Image (spheres, coloured by chain):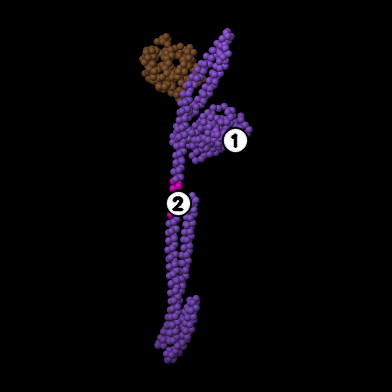
Chain colours: A purple, B brown
């Protein structure tokens, strides 16, 4: 039991830990995704910077090309191209400057490029200015010796340098991105493995528990049905024993009656013979006193009547006992006719039958309102309860206000009725004895043969029930009758 | 045939004491008819059917029957006596037994017993009951011998 509990605690801990780990891995995965997004943004940024550099380079080249074109053929189309491109250079550089604001190295390059471009533009503007004024030769002369060619070379160099810088960054950032992606994949794989472990573990535990639960439920069920079977067997045993006893009682009492008829009959014969003898003795005493001796007088006057008297009272008592047994066995052979009994009404009726005695002795009696109704034999129940109530009325304690409380409750398929009194009580040593035939307990100051409770118990057995007593001498007694709520419902056989 | 043909009393009773008490009380009641006593069913039936002076051949009889016999049940004897086409069918049967079981009494009457007397332990009532038999005997119609034999 204890190791079981420890194992359970271990299992719960393991499952909790597994789920916590899973949550941790989930968070890690999320973090990796966020990181990966950041890296992707950086890569994207680098591409934009490279595009801006390319743009700048194209604009610079186009400007140079436009100027050369104008030197060869001065038309308005080319002039427009030159002017427009000249206007775009500065904003392109500003954009580049803003894009690389986080990189001081590139800032420096951009600043350098701005200076170069401005110088380049100034050179070109001067040359184009001459063209517009019609000094084509001057423009061509300046082209051959001015700064524009070295400048455009420098611009190319600086653009190359910037591109190289961005390429370097791109390489680093792409590597970073790949790393975070790999980390993400690892996390996902880890999560999957963990999920499988926790899942399989949980299922294994649940299956185990379910199997244990099913097993214990089955075991409980088996145990229960065994118990029911045991109860049924016991009830059948009791009923069989009871029936055997009834039959035995019937035969014995019946056969005992025959000799008893003889004893009583011949006692009567003896009595009449003795009375004749007595009459003759009287005459002899009067007419011939010499014949009469003391011994004969004693025999006729005392011994014979005394002997006959004892034989008579003893056989009368025996007759009463035999009749009691006979009544008991006859009652036991009476067929049980179960019907739905309104127990409260039945008990009330019984109490009303005892009303006179109750009032005479000043006994307070109560019946609980919630006694359960049962399906059983009316007469048998009336006799059982009537007997116990009768005893409670008979054996009150003289020193206190007597009271009797009748209550009942249903317990599963059984109904339990309790009849509690505050009478003189029964010595615990006699608790079994009082249910035996002809056995009584305590002071023998009340009439009775010791049959009532034996009869009560025999009836209770017949109804598939039991009866027991709880009592202490001087403390009152509680008789508990345990009966099936529905007679025959749990018995294998009924008589 | 005529009243000279006295009614024989056939007593089937296994208990000697009971038999003696019954006889005593019958005599005390002033009945002095012959009493034939049998302690078992077999010899009683043998007498009833086959004895030349028995009731089947010779005249009226009264049967006193105890139900508890060693060799057969008294009710069996009763049933045989009272069955259809039996020469003894009209012979009155008084069942005398210790049982006062209602079922058994009813069964005896159903089988055709004429009187059922419980042997009470109270001797006075027992004696009274036996004495009633005297009255009963005095009103028995002596059957015609031809009919009895037929």
Q: Secondary structure at mark 1?
A: loop
In magenta stretch: residue B7: no
Q: Residue at point 45% right, 82% down?
A: A158
Q: Judge the density around disc 1: few (<14), some (14-19), many (≥20) Cα neighbours within 10 Å.
A: some
Mark 2 sits on what residue? A209
- Position of residue A421 measured from the top left corner of the image (x, y, whole percent): 58, 34
Q: Chain of mark 2?
A: A
Q: Which of the marked residues, 1 or 2, is nearer the chain's N terminus?
A: 2
Secondary structure that dominates the magenta span: helix
A479 or A412: nearer the viewer: A479
Q: Is residue B47 above or below residue A1?
A: above
Q: In the image, are marks 1 and 2 on the same chain? A: yes
- Answer with left or right where residue B1 lies relative to residue A279: left
- Position of residue A65 measured from the top left corner of the image (x, y, whole percent): 41, 84
B90 or A449: nearer the viewer: A449
Q: Judge the density around disc 2: few (<14), some (14-19), many (≥20) Cα neighbours within 10 Å.
A: few
């Amino acid at each position: 039991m204890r190791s079981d509990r420890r194992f359970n605690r271990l299992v719960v801990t393991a499952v909790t830990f597994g789920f916590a780990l899973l949550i941790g891995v989930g968070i890690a995965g999320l973090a990796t995704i966020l990181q990966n997004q950041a890296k992707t943004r950086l890569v994207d940024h680098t591409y934009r910077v490279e595009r801006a550099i390319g743009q700048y380079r194209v604009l610079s080249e186009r400007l140079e090309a436009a100027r050369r074109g104008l030197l060869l053929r001065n038309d308005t189309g080319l002039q427009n191209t030159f002017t427009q491109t000249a206007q775009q250079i500065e904003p392109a550089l500003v954009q580049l400057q803003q894009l690389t604001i986080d990189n001081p190295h590139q800032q420096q390059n951009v600043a350098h490029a701005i200076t170069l471009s401005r110088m380049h533009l100034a050179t070109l503007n001067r040359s184009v200015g001459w063209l517009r004024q019609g000094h084509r030769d001057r423009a061509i002369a300046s082209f051959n010796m001015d700064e524009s060619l070295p400048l455009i070379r420098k611009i190319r160099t600086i653009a190359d340098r910037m591109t190289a810088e961005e390429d370097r960054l791109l390489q680093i950032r792409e590597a970073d991105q790949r790393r975070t992606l790999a980390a993400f994949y690892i996390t996902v794989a880890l999560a999957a493995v963990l999920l499988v472990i926790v899942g399989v573990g949980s299922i294994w535990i649940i299956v185990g528990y379910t199997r244990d639960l099913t097993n214990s439920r089955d075991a409980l069920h088996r145990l229960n049905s065994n118990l029911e079977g045991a109860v049924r067997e016991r009830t059948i045993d009791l009923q069989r024993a009871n029936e055997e006893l009834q039959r035995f009682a019937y035969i014995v009492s019946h056969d005992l009656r025959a000799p008893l008829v003889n004893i009583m009959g011949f006692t009567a014969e003896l009595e009449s013979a003795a009375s004749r003898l007595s009459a003759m003795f009287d005459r002899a005493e009067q007419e011939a006193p010499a014949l009469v001796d003391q011994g004969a007088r004693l025999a006729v006057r005392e011994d014979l009547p005394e002997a006959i008297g004892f034989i008579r009272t003893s056989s009368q008592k025996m007759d009463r006992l035999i009749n009691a047994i006979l009544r008991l066995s006859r009652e036991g052979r009476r067929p049980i006719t179960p019907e739905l009994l309104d127990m409260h009404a039945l008990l009330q009726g019984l109490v009303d039958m005892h009303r006179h005695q109750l009032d005479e002795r000043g006994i307070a009696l109560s019946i609980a309102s919630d006694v359960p109704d049962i399906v059983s034999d009316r007469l048998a129940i009336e006799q059982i309860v009537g007997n116990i109530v009768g005893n409670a009325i008979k054996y009150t304690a003289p020193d206190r206000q007597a009271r009797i409380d009748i209550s009942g409750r249903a317990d599963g398929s059984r109904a339990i009725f309790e009849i509690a009194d505050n009478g003189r009580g029964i010595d615990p040593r006699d608790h079994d004895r009082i249910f035996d035939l002809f056995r009584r307990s305590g002071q023998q100051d009340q009439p009775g043969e010791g049959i009532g409770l034996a009869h009560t118990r025999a009836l209770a057995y017949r109804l598939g029930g039991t009866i027991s007593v709880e009592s202490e001498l001087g403390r009152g007694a509680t008789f508990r009758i345990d009966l099936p709520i529905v007679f025959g419902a749990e018995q294998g056989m009924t008589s | 045939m005529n009243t000279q043909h006295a009614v024989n009393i056939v007593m089937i009773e296994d208990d000697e004491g009971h038999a003696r008490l019954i006889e005593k009380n019958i005599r005390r009641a002033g009945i002095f008819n012959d009493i034939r006593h049998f302690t078992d069913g077999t010899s009683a039936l043998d007498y009833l059917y086959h004895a030349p002076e028995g009731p089947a051949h010779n005249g009226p009889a009264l049967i006193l029957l105890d139900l508890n016999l060693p060799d057969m049940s008294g009710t069996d004897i009763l049933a045989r006596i009272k069955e259809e086409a039996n020469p003894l069918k009209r012979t009155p049967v008084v069942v005398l037994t210790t049982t006062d079981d209602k079922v058994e009494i009813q069964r005896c009457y159903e089988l055709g017993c004429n009187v059922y007397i419980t042997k009470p332990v109270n001797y006075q009532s027992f004696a009274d009951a036996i004495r009633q038999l005297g009255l009963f005997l005095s009103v028995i119609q002596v059957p015609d011998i031809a009919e009895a034999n037929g």
